[in-house]
Amino acid sequence: MFDEPVVFVDIETNGGAVGKGRITEIAAIRVEGGEVVDTFTSLVNTGAPLPVWITNLTGITDADLVHAPYFDEIAEDLKRIFDGAIFAAHNVRFDYSYVKHHFKQLGYDFRPKLFCTVRMSRAMYPEHKGHSLQKIIERHSIAVDDRHRAYADAKAIYDFAKLAYAEKGKARFDEAKAKQLKSRSLPPNLDAKYLEGITDNPGVYIFETESGATLYVGKSVHLKTRIQSHFTQDTIINKEMNLSMQSHKLRVIETANELEALLLESSLVKELNPILNRQLRRVRSHFVFLAGINENGYRTVTIADKDLAKEADPSAVYGMFTSKAKARAALESSMKAYILCPRLSGLEKTKGACFQHQLGRCKGACVGKEPAVSYNERTELALNRTKIEHWPFKTPVAIGTDSNDMIVVNNWIIEGYLRSPMESEPVFDPIEKNFDLDTYRILRQFISKSKNSLLVRPVNRLLTDGQA
């Protein structure tokens, strides 16, 4: 099947993440010239108890590992059997990542060619839907003595490779092998066709599961380079390994510039709820601080739920939080930092002196001991820390480039898109207005940059109102 030595490998682990987990069993079958020339199998002592679910899955117990060798004791035997050979496994980058990490801890840089029997199955048996080892074993009636044990599974993928070679022929096998060795970092379930035509332009990419569920949404100013980086880091970063193992489909949306990519990524994460992204949800209203003056002239603060898209000037609002708990935590922090009264800050419902005053942590504004002027100055300083930045323009502005549609923004809210802005009669395409915290942060950062390639132009208010 191969013009050079190949070793069929399988490992069992303690279930730990890539870079942290430990191998509990490893098996290797070395094949040269179509013949098995060497085999190796061993349990591996991890030095720690096994999770119950691992024992239930593999049958390996703590008692089995007590007298087993540690990885460093079998490392030389493994080096010998792997020497100069292709490393073949089912979901090869998973097995390889653990072996590579264990060797690295011993100071050995392990970088063999990789061959994945999942990718081989997908390439040579595209008519079948499932390509897990269990489905392959059942589909091809491969004899397996002890499923989920390393040697039995290693022999199963070797037997499957021989069967595929015999059924599909040398030419088909060589073609599948050549593609793999050329693109060694490609995830096992992601067809190379999804990477065809991807440029290094700005945009957003979406990884999906086999069923079409969204795994991850990302953005980059260099799409092709960023997408490929996910696949080269999967052997050292657990999140990247999860992405690699679960990805079946890839969608790419190019944008005109980095700003559009950032805004689109933020919107899609909220809309699609990807499994591996930091979970964000679209927030219609925010919890904010409202400042007032009581009958004694002292500044008060209350937490309120507000839709900032309906505010004429969002910069007149203090604070901006996605939950009441976060708003309260921020107010408590400011109260301690600026020695504010918890009763006047709406955090304590008492009459007379607040509890903090009794502890000497409030200067007595609650009972008139501290002058209102000095107390109000500190309150204003505390509130200004959380104030939304003032909109720096007198009108809505269009942000973009000469050759593309421009984003129309007013008071940190995206109002729509100005189509073909360089033509004599530009057309405004409005969208539903919504103040979004992430959008605000992205726009503020971009507008504040002294150097960027985007144009910022004032927009006639009548145009965006649809009256011209």
Image (cartoon, rainbow, N blue to C red):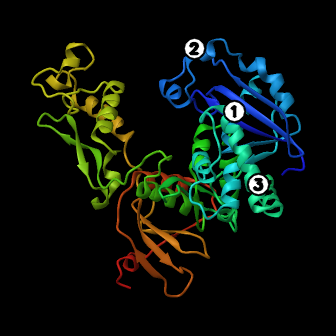
Mark 1 residue crowding within 10 angstroms, few (<14) / some (14–19) / many (20+)? many
Q: Quadrant of residue 195?
A: bottom right
Kindly identify which residue carries mark 2. 63
- Name the secondary structure under disc 3: helix
Question: Looking at the picture, which amino acid does disc 2 mark?
Answer: Ala
Question: Looking at the picture, which amino acid does disc 3 mark?
Answer: Gln
37 up-or-down from 287: above or below: above
Q: Position of residue 147 (x, y in %)?
A: 59, 36
107 up-or-down from 90: above or below: above
Q: Position of residue 175 (x, y in %)?
A: 80, 61
Q: Look at the numbered discs 1 and 3 and tell me whether their residues touch, using CB distance below 8 Å.
A: no
Instruction: Work out how far the residue at label 1 is from the one at label 3, CA to CA, in angstroms.
Output: 24 Å
Q: Which mark is residue 151?
A: 1
Q: Earlier in the sequence, mark 1 or mark 3?
A: 1
Instruction: Work out how far the residue at label 2 is from the one at label 3, CA to CA, in angstroms.
Output: 40 Å
Q: Quadrant of residue 44?
A: top right
- Name the secondary structure under disc 1: helix
Please give the name of the residue rendered at 43% of the width and 57% of the height, measured from the top-left corner.
272
Q: Which mark is residue 180?
A: 3
Question: Looking at the picture, which amino acid does disc 1 mark?
Answer: Tyr
In this view, the mark in front (1 or 3): 1
Q: Earlier in the sequence, mark 1 or mark 2?
A: 2
Mark 3 residue crowding within 10 angstroms, few (<14) / some (14–19) / many (20+)? many
Q: Earlier in the sequence, mark 2 or mark 3?
A: 2
366 up-or-down from 262: above or below: above
Q: Look at the numbered discs 2 and 3 and tell me whether their residues touch, using CB distance below 8 Å.
A: no
